[in-house]
Structures are given as structure tokens and as C-alpha cells.
Amino acid sequence: MRARRALWRLLGALWWWALPLRRSEALRALRDTLPERASEAPTLLRGAVGSVALGYLELAVGSPMPIRGLDRLAAALRPDRGVLCLGGHNGPWDLLLVRCSQQVPVTVFVKRPSSRLAAWALQRLRRGGDLELLPPRGAFAAAERALQAGRVVLLVQDQRHNPGPAVPFFGRPARTSEGYARLRSLADRLGAPTFGALAWRREDGTAEGEIQALNAPQDGDLTAWTQGFYEGAARARPGDWWWLHRRWR
């Protein structure tokens, strides 16, 4: 465990000093959003980046990941009706995604990296489970079919989505996908419940995940409601959220 923790910290430090991509923007976003944690911002950011980088190494070598509540998610699936699940960029999110897909069928909207090398590497790392990857645009018909076929439809709505509406995120307007709101009417007809999926690292460096049932409202601004889920997760564990996203650009 000491070696894993040391590698986690080392990967975060390498990013910080050798390839400080969006470092200044991320620091500003974290300090503006959580001023009470401003003094910890550099440590939190290094930890967040190191955690994601370590997660890909763990995927490559087949490291396990305990996920609390996954059995409840599996039990909620039926052959004619899946579930909606909100996932986000918390901790080693790709490790959580793949480990879930090894136990339940998962359909998720993901952006393809612009780098061909990065796209190829991610494609290889994400193998090993029942994982269907959909593009972020023009694939809602496929998502609806997946929900009707008893799959977990995972929506990642904690990054900027330019065509979407501006809804409050930490009290500031942020362009957000309406994916959950668009699928909700079908989910209601099918009786599909909503879950949330989170990942983080313990102090010893080991990755952990949790699936929790969410009490989605029956009306109101459903897109804004999804942002409350992410805000709560980021407040609880700011060192596990991906502050490098330009949410308020």
C-alpha cells in the first residue's frame, strides 16, 4: 500500500512540475469555488491528477476495485428495463467504469480524445467488460434502446456541454448536458430507477467506488438537479474531482 500511495503522489507531482496542463485555471476554479480550501488547492489538484493517472495503470495491470452498492444496481436491472446512472469525473473514473461493466451491462456517452494515440490506448484499456460507448451527440436513440434492453445507461454530466443550458453549479452558471432530462420520460414509463456512481482514493492510495440510489424529483429542473449531485460529491472530496474541466468558461 505504501508503494501505491507513493506512486499516486509521484504521478501528481510529475504533472504539476513537468506538464502543468491547465494548472493555473484549475487552481483558480478550486479557490473561487471552495475558498475555505484555498490553501490546500495545490495538494488537492496534484492528488486528483495523480489518482486518474494511477487509475489507468491499474486498468493496464488488472487491479481490482471494491465497489459498494453494485449488487443493488445489478438487482434493479430487468430484461425489459434498465436503470439510469449518473457518473462523473471523480477519482479513477475509468477504472470504476470498466469494473462495473464486468458485472453489469453498461452503456455510456463518452467523448473521443482528439489524439489518435490516446483514443487507441483508451479503447484497449476499456476492454474486458460489457461496455457500449456512445458519442456525446446523436446517439439518444441508441441510449433509449439500451434502457429498454435492461442495461445501465450511464450519463456523465459534470463537464461543459456548449449546446446545453446554463444551470447553477456551485452558484455559477455552467453549460450542461440535458441527457438525463431527455431520458427521464422514457425511464418513468419503464419504471427505471436512478443511481449515482462515485470513485475516490483512500489515504493508502487504494481505489474505491460506491453506487448509491438517488431520489430524483418528479418535476422541476432535472438538469440543475443533476448538478447538485456532482456539487455534493466535489464538496465532500475536492481532491477527487477533475477541476481541470473548464466548467465556467
Image (cartoon, grey):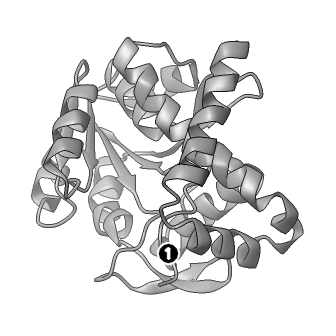
Q: Residue at left 59%, top 52%?
A: 17
Does residue 39 sit above or below 6 in this rendering? below
Q: Quadrant of the N terminus?
A: top right
Is 234 placed left or right of 130 in the picture? right
Does residue 2 sit above or below 215 in this rendering? above
Q: Residues within 10 Å of mark 1 (few under 14, many from 20)?
A: some
Is 2 placed left or right of 49 in the picture? right
| Amino acid at the residue labelled 1 | Arg
Is 190 placed left or right of 115 in the picture? right
Does residue 214 sit above or below 39 in this rendering? above
Quarter-of-image position of residue 105? top left
Residue linked to disc 1: 247
Where disc 1 sits, the SS reads loop
The count of marks equals 1
Quarter-of-image position of residue 199? top right
- In front of the other: 38 or 233: 38
Residue 148 appears in view: no
- In front of the other: 18 or 103: 18
Does residue 146 sit above or below 57 in this rendering? below
Quarter-of-image position of residue 25? bottom right
Q: Residue at left 62%, top 66%?
A: 228
x%, y% of residue 88? Answer: 48, 51
Q: Residue at left 32%, top 81%?
A: 162
Residue 40 appears in view: yes
x%, y% of residue 49? Answer: 56, 46
